[in-house]
Each structure stands twice: as C-alpha cells, then as structure tokens.
Image: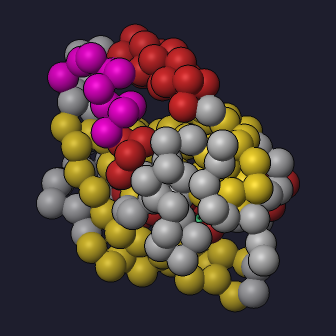
Amino acid sequence: MTEYGVKKVLITEEEIKAKIEEYGKILAEEYRDRNPLFVGILKGSFIFMADIVRATQIPCEIDFMSASSYYNGTVSTGNVKIKMDLNTDLNGRDVIIAEDIIDTGNTLFAVKKLFLQRGAKSVKIVTFLDKPDRRVADISPDYALFTIPDEFVIGYGLDCAEKYRNLKYIGVYEEE
Ligand code: IMP
Ligand code: MG
C-alpha cells in the first residue's frame, strides 16, 4: 500500500535503516577524535540529519543552514544565497555537510566553497541520495547512501511543494 501521490516505493524504510547504520559506522571510524561539525541544509536534510548523527556514535556538533544557489541557466556561479546562517565558527573545523539529495550540485558547490573560505579545515559531503544524471556543477559527494535514476522522489525529508516530507520511505512522485 502506498500513499496518494506515490507511484512506487523506490527505497523501503528497512533499506534506509540498514544503510544509515552502515554509514554511521564509516563516519565514526573516519572522524573519531576530530569533533566534526555536521551541517544540515534545510529543510530537506532534517530527517537524514537526525538519523545519521545517532548512527555516528562519536563526539560531534550539529548546526543547520538554509541556502540556495544562484545560477545562470544551468551554469553555477558558485554564489550562494543564505536564508538562515550557521551559528558556528568554522575556523579549523572538520565539517560534514549532510544533504538530502544532490541533483544539479549547484547548492553544494556553492556551500562547500563558502565553508572553505570561512576557514574550515576540511569539508566533506554525505548525501542521502545522489542523482548523478542531472549533475551540472563540478562536485561529487564523498559519501552517498543511495544512487538513484533521474526521477522526482519524495519522502524521508524530501518534498513536492512542501508535502510528503514525513513519509518513512523514498517514493517516486506520481505526476497528475
Ligand atoms: P541542487 O543539487 O542544487 O540541484 O539542489 C538539490 C536540492 O533540490 C535538494 O536539496 C532538494 O531540495 C531539491 N531536489 C532535487 N531533486 C529532488 C527530488 O527528486 N525530490 C525533491 N527535491 C529534490
Ligand atoms: Mg535541499
């Protein structure tokens, strides 16, 4: 049984849980003793953020920002419009950006550049979903839990016109 608006289930709740555990252990291994700062890009990352930090059982800190990129047609200018900024000084920090999905890559291209300009020691990207077919910007995630085809997906934080963020699975959106 799928909800209204869902054409098919692409990734089940069980598959999500298993991947989160796997990647939490990988991050804990890599970032042990480095007190990383997880940065979630709102709103889409809020559920992934809550799950991945609980699977990464090491000392860490958490912050959020809301950002969108400017681009000319399909070409990223590398500039980012910040709607809500971090409260954390990035100087010398090991930053892990937690994102719901990398699509064109414009947003993360700009955010990563900004964080390095602010003095971060390292910036890595962990994305829940990767949609590489649509990539425009020169960026790839350091960790991608699932790689998906070029379909519009909803659930687990991802929306269509602000709906469906609370689905427990990833579904393909059914267009009318
Ligand atoms: P981009 O990588 O700069 O194109 O932007 C990625 C953002 O676009 C994500 O953080 C999502 O908010 C949104 N997005 C991209 N693809 C999808 C999708 O299939 N479903 C829902 N939101 C998406
Ligand atoms: Mg997003």
Q: Residue at x 66, y 64 (%)?
A: 5
* 153 relative to 26, above or below: below
Taking the image as shown, residue 60 lies to the left or right of residue 81, namely left
Return the residue nearer the eye: 10 or 54.
10
Q: Quadrant of residue 144?
A: top right
Outermost residue on the front side: it is: 1
Taking the image as shown, residue 147 lies to the left or right of residue 133, namely left
Taking the image as shown, residue 160 lies to the left or right of residue 61, namely right
Q: Can the viewer see residue 131 in this picture?
A: no
What's the magenta region? 50-59
Q: Residue at x 51, y 61 (%)?
A: 164
Image location (x, y in percent) of residue 109: 57, 61
On the rendered image, what quadrant is the C terminus found in? Answer: bottom right
Return the residue nearer the eye: 137 or 160.
160
Return the residue nearer the eye: 11 or 74.
11
The magenta stretch spans residue 52: yes
On the rendered image, what quadrant is the N terminus found in? Answer: top right
Which secondary structure dominates the residues rendered in magenta?
A: helix
The magenta stretch spans residue 160: no
Quadrant hosting ligand 1: bottom right
Q: Residue at x 62, y 67 (%)?
A: 106
Image location (x, y in percent) of residue 47: 38, 46
Q: Quadrant of residue 89?
A: bottom left
